[in-house]
């Protein structure tokens, strides 16, 4: 950025003197020269600035870089806006954009637009020196939508506009209702009193008796002040010294200063202007002149900062999405050899925040986040992407720690004005420069959306045109057939224990996928995929058959049998003929169905006749039914009542609640109810002694969980079983 900042500065200064020369030649109205100085100070990044009178269509030139071809001649001839803009378009704008721009910027169209909006930005391309440059035009009305007399047109090239530091210092305009504030720095009591008398009816006057006091007020209140009147001759600090100090501070120099002088020496006047004063007022005061100069300056300053603010989000002050598109492009163009990452941050449940804490608090949260992202976007830019989303682009974070994003995310949440706010991030790394910026944003957005419902994940990367999830699904699906054939799926066994005696009472079979290359995929990953595409039905049956075979082997070796439960997915329940097939498999292999309990998830236990018939049929075939994951989903105690379950399995989330007063109470009631219905209760996911202790107290029957034992591979489970038998640690039915 600012690759030719120095050169530009020279250019602007050169223009200024050029125009001043013309003032002296009597070519340009003295007012214009004054405006130009103001613009020079307030918004360096604008190359051309015009005012258009709404009634007459007449043009005023506030500032001109002199690069627009053909326009000046027309203006000098007193051309109407329509003629001037049309000349500009024909002679400067890239041919593809001409027609559209002519339509969009017709005087009628611009006025219509400004009736509805305070301002707008129009972007287009200019063909100059054999290259295409990106430009934008900012239009703002001066006045209300139903009554405005003047329109400000500011032309800027995007390259220049990147000097956003300057833009960001543009001051907020005073809100209409409040009286604008004028600071008078003047040591002479009588002069101060006179100025107060002139200004008081229109402005709030703040007085300072010398340079030091004036500076102190300016430092504390520069945001509120509209104008400073500064006397040149004062004890302890002269006006020039004050100007000298102000000049070096971007915030202080954002307030226009008018110098008051009694000496008519041009030399001193020039020096003041050089030091950043916007105007010079002669003593003795002429009330009409004082008021009109101040009014003009305030008007120009506010319109200029208004123009500057168009690109900035009103609430947060950072770039709007539209502005981001342009600046990101310029940033990429200016750094051709560098990899850039784009990130979108999405505040979760922001609507909820608004409704719980109120909109004012919600706004505060957004402002906080905007300023956080602004400071943390290193060497890049960020913007408010939409309501509760932010976007940033910056050079790839290769030299950063792997977890820097996570660290930043937790830092953000830690200092947030309200607790428990979650923000998720979608990162599109090494952006493809062939894409439009909005296309890049789409990819980051796609990534962040993909983790919306995943509570454990804070950020994810965009992973090619097919979504990550989809890619994984496809991999699993493509391997399924082969995996089934070559036996990559294994049942593991997690033992269950009697809560009172701690003796082994059975086990649950849990599927494991160990791919040929040794990759271990956990069921949490592939079960959802297979549930979606229906392959789960075949996997269930495969597991059932496999477990039956193993149980049969134990039988044949003379072991006494323990029930080994098998999971049955919802899809299997809905499938025609499942009961018959399972029954047949068990018969063919030769295992009594009572040793093969089926775990059905609670969500599957819908109150439909179909399920009722299905579960009844399973019971008739001799299967025991376990209601799995009770308490995890939409728990329905009613289904306990209607359906013929033998066992309720308390979900781990309920067990995790132990220790929480409400949770304890609830568990107690569930167990009482289950016992009342003659069902046994299994607690799953028991990890701690305290949980076990409590479960015992409330008469839970069976315990499954890491506290006793994790799921074991076939061989290890056999060894475990063997040892329990030897130690008389098994409880057979
Ligand atoms: P589930 O049926 O609720 O199985 C219990 C899960 O909790 C198992 O995870 C088990 O390893 C885990 N677990 C057991 N004790 C503890 C503990 O103390 N702490 C913690 N944190 N976890 C414990 P797994 O094996 O990853 O299975 C996940 C889910 O995948 C199962 O949940 C089940 O819904 C499904 N699943 C597993 N195998 C099969 C299968 O063969 N068929 C079908 N349809 N689904 C299966
Ligand atoms: Ca289960
Ligand atoms: Ca469960």
Image (cartoon, rainbow, N blue to C red):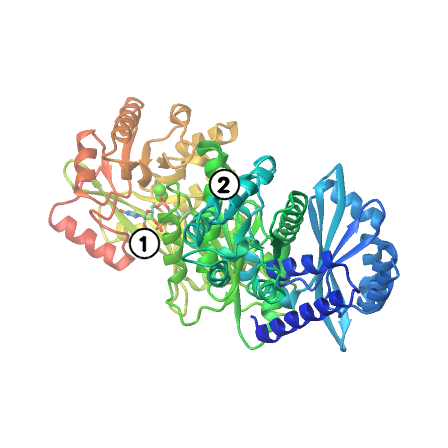
Quarter of the image with the C terminus is top left
For image coordinates 27% across by 55% down, the residue present is 712
Q: Quadrant of residue 504?
A: top left
For image coordinates 74% across by 72% down, the residue present is 132
Q: Which residue is mark 1?
A: 492
Residue 1 rendering spot, x and y as whole percentages? 56, 70
Q: Which class describes the residues within 10 Å of circle 1: few (<14), some (14-19), or many (20+)?
A: many
Q: Which residue is mark 2?
A: 363
Residue 3 rendering spot, x and y as whole percentages? 57, 74
Q: Is residue 236 left or right of residue 253?
A: left
First in sequence: mark 1 vs mark 2: 2
In the image, the residue with mark 1 has its CB under 8 Å from the nearest atom of ligand 1 = yes
- Location of residue 313 with respect to 128 vertically, above or below: above
Residue 584 rendering spot, x and y as whole percentages? 44, 44
Ligand 2 lies in which image quarter?
top left
Q: Secondary structure at mark 2?
A: helix
* Front residue of this view, candidates 402 and 187: 187
Residue 270 rendering spot, x and y as whole percentages? 61, 65
């Amino acid at each position: 950025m600012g690759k030719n900042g120095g050169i530009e500065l020279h250019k602007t200064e050169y223009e200024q003197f050029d125009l001043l020369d013309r003032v002296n030649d009597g070519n340009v109205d003295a007012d214009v020269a004054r405006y130009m100085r103001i613009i020079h100070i307030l918004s360096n990044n604008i190359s051309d600035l015009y005012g258009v009178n709404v009634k007459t269509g007449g043009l005023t030139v506030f500032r001109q870089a002199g690069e627009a071809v053909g326009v000046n001649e027309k203006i000098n001839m007193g051309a109407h806006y329509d003629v001037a803009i049309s000349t500009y378009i024909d002679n400067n704008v890239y041919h593809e954009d001409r027609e559209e721009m002519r339509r969009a910027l017709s005087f009628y169209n611009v006025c219509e637009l400004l009736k509805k909006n305070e301002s707008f930005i129009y972007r287009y391309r200019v063909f100059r020196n054999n290259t295409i440059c990106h430009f934008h035009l900012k239009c703002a009305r001066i006045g209300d939508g139903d009554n405005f007399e003047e329109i400000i047109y500011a032309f800027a090239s995007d390259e220049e506009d990147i000097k956003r530091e300057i833009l960001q210092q543009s001051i907020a305009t005073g809100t209409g209702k409040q009286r604008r504030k004028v600071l008078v720095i003047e040591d002479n009591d009588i002069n101060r009193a006179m100025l107060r008398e002139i200004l008081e009816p229109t402005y709030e006057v703040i007085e300072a008796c010398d340079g030091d006091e004036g500076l102190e007020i300016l430092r504390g209140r520069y945001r509120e002040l509209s104008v400073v009147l500064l006397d040149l001759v004062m004890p302890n600090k002269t006006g020039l010294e004050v100007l000298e100090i102000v000049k070096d501070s971007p915030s202080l120099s954002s307030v226009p200063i008018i110098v008051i002088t009694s000496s008519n020496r041009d030399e001193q006047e020039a020096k003041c202007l050089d030091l950043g004063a916007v105007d010079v007022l002669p003593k003795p005061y002429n009330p009409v002149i004082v008021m009109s100069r101040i009014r003009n300056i305030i008007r120009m300053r506010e319109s200029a900062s208004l123009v500057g603010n168009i690109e900035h989000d009103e609430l947060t002050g950072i770039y709007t999405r539209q502005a981001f598109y342009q600046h990101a492009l310029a940033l990429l163009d200016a750094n051709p050899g560098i990899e850039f990452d784009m990130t979108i941050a999405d505040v979760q449940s922001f609507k909820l925040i608004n409704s719980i804490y109120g909109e004012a608090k919600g706004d505060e949260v957004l402002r906080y986040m905007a300023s956080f992202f602004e400071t943390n976007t290193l060497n890049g830019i960020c913007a408010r992407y939409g309501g509760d989303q932010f976007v940033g682009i910056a050079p790839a974070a290769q030299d950063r720690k792997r977890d820097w994003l996570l660290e930043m995310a937790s830092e953000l949440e830690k200092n947030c004005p309200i607790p428990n706010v979650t923000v998720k991030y979608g990162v599109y790394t090494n952006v493809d420069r062939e894409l439009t910026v909005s296309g890049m944003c789409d990819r980051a957005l796609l990534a962040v959306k993909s983790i919306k419902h995943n509570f454990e994940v804070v950020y994810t990367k965009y992973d090619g045109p097919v979504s990550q999830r989809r890619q994984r699904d496809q991999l699993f699906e493509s391997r399924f057939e082969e995996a089934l054939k070559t036996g990559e799926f294994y049942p593991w066994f997690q033992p269950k224990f009697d809560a009172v005696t701690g003796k082994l009472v059975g086990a649950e079979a849990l599927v494991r996928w160990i791919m040929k290359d040794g990759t271990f995929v956990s069921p949490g990953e592939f079960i959802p995929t297979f549930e979606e595409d229906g392959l789960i039905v075949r996997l269930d049956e495969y597991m059932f058959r496999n477990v039956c075979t193993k149980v049969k082997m134990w039988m044949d070796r003379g072991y006494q049998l323990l029930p080994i439960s098998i999971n049955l997915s919802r899809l299997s329940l809905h499938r025609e003929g499942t009961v018959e097939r399972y029954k047949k498999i068990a018969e063919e292999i030769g295992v009594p169905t009572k040793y093969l309990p089926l775990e059905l998830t609670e969500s599957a236990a819908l109150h439909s006749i179909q399920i009722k018939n299905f579960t009844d049929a399973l019971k008739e075939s001799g299967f025991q039914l376990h209601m799995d994951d009770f308490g995890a989903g939409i728990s329905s105690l009613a289904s306990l009542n209607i359906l013929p379950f033998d066992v309720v399995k308390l979900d781990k989330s309920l067990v995790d609640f132990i220790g929480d007063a409400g949770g304890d109470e609830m568990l107690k009631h569930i167990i009482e109810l289950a016992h009342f219905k003659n069902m046994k209760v299994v607690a799953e996911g028991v990890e701690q002694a305290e949980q076990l202790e409590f479960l015992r107290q409330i008469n839970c029957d069976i315990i499954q969980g890491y506290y006793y034992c994790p799921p074991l591979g076939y061989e290890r489970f056999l060894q475990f079983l063997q040892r329990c038998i030897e130690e008389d640690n098994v409880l057979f039915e």
